[in-house]
């Protein structure tokens, strides 16, 4: 039985994961304000997360492709995946852009 709220909860989960990734990506930029050993650790963490996220994103696109071939995909999932990937890998640029907007 397919629940009507499952697609919404999936998009919410993708959104929450993206938000968490943006917050993690924010950490090194926040640390730049004070030169601390935390900055090195945060930069290493960001690099590790991006290295871990790349195959996950590839697998996600492959799964979406398989679902599209089986005609079982809603476009909401596709848009959510594209948005999530864009936010996850574009996080440093997004942070720079937001900081520039507010003059931080």
Image (cartoon, rainbow, N blue to C red):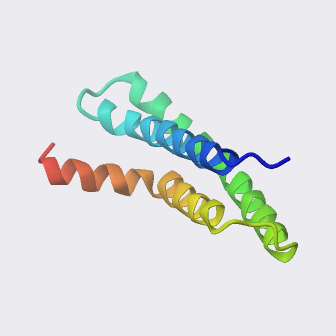
Q: How far across and how far down the image is residue 17, in percent?
A: 57, 40
Q: Position of residue 44 (x, y in %)?
A: 53, 36
The residue depicted at 45 percent of the width and 42 percent of the height is 22
Q: How many marks are shown on the rendered structure?
A: 0
Residue toward you, 11 or 103: 11
Which residue in the rendered view is the most extreme toward the left?
Answer: 103
Position of 26 with respect to 77 (left or right) is left
Residue 24, percent from left and from top:
47, 35
Q: Quadrant of residue 37?
A: top left
Q: For residue 66, what is the image quadrant?
A: bottom right
- In front of the other: 9 or 52: 9
In the visual, does 75 lie left or right of 41?
right
Give the vertical position of 65 relative to 29 (above or below): below
Quadrant containing the C terminus in the rendered view = top left
* Residue at (75% x, 65% y) in the render: 64
Asked whether 20 or 14 is in front, the reply is: 14
> Residue placed at 72% from the left, 52% from the top?
56
The residue located at (22%, 47%) in the rendering is 99
Considering only vertical position in the picture, is 69 above or below 23?
below
């Amino acid at each position: 039985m397919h629940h009507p709220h499952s697609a919404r909860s999936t998009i919410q989960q993708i959104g929450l994961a993206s938000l968490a990734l943006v917050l993690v990506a924010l950490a090194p930029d926040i640390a730049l304000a004070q030169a601390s050993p935390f900055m090195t650790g945060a930069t290493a963490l960001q690099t590790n997360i991006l290295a871990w996220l790349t195959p996950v994103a590839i697998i996600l696109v492959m799964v979406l492709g398989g679902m599209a071939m089986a005609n079982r995909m809603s476009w909401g999932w596709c848009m959510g995946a594209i948005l999530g990937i864009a936010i996850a890998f574009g996080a440093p640029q997004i942070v720079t852009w937001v900081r520039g907007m507010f003059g931080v």
